[in-house]
Image: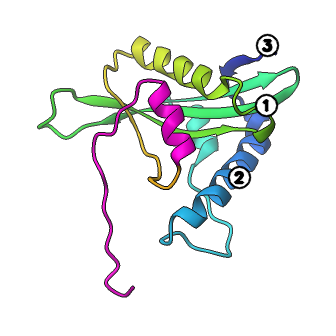
């Protein structure tokens, strides 16, 4: 199987928006703070396509998009050693293509883009209740750094 990684275009938006809804459907059961039973959106994908600080990538097999990710350069607070960091989000691979190295290829490509931009630190967020994603990120060299904790006093 030979797939290519490329920068997303406006023509890819319908597929990207579908991927976003699939990500949200997967994450809703992991996050009781998300609005339920209503369409929501995480990402302003059309804006990201034109943002010079954001690179949206797709993995393509023949004429089908099989995966996506974005990398975004974000400013840091002045007490950190670096002024900017790279943030990875919107990781999605079609179920039929999982286990074929697509997510690893997307991470490698976005990491190369960050390196070209002079970014030396990359972070991402992943739900603690998503061990498959955690394993994939660890396989790419990511390590846990901070743990966000939550309390709902009404529970």
Residue that mark 1 sits on: 65
Q: Is residue 81 magenta?
A: no
Q: Main secondary structure of the magenta part?
A: loop
- 104 or 19: nearer the viewer: 104
Q: Could you say where residue 86 lies in the image, as x and y percent from the top left?
A: 38, 30
In the rendered image, the residue lying farthest to the bottom is 154
Q: How many residues crowd mark 2 within 10 Å: few (<14), some (14–19), many (20+)?
A: some
Give the alpha-carbon distance from disc 3 to disc 1, as whole Å: 12 Å
The part of the chain drawn in magenta is: 131-155
Q: Is residue 144 magenta?
A: yes
Element type at mark 3: loop
Q: How is the image coloured?
A: rainbow
Give the image quarter of residue 55.
top right
Give the alpha-carbon distance from disc 3 to disc 2, as whole Å: 24 Å
Residue at 19% in and 41% down = 77
Give the alpha-carbon distance from disc 2 to disc 1, as whole Å: 14 Å
122 lies left or right of 104: left
- 10 or 148: nearer the viewer: 148
Element type at mark 1: strand
Residue at 77% in and 24% down = 60
Dot 3 or dot 1: first in sequence order is 3
Looking at the image, residue 94 lies above or below residue 28: above
Residue at 41% in and 24% down = 141
Residue that mark 3 sits on: 2
């Amino acid at each position: 199987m030979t797939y290519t990684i490329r920068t997303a275009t406006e023509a890819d938006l319908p597929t990207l928006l579908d991927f976003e809804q699939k990500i949200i459907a997967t994450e809703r059961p992991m996050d009781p703070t998300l609005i339920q039973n209503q369409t929501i959106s995480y990402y302003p994908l059309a804006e990201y396509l034109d943002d010079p600080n954001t690179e949206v990538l797709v993995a393509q097999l023949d004429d089908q998009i099989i995966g996506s990710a974005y990398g975004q350069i974000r400013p840091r607070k002045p007490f950190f050693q670096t002024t900017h960091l790279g943030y990875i989000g919107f990781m999605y691979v079609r179920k039929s293509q999982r286990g074929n190295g697509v997510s690893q290829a997307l991470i490698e490509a976005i990491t190369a883009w960050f390196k070209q931009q002079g970014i030396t630190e990359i972070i991402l967020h992943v739900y603690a209740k998503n061990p498959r994603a955690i394993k994939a990120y660890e396989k790419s060299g990511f390590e846990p750094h901070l743990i966000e904790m939550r309390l709902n006093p009404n529970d």
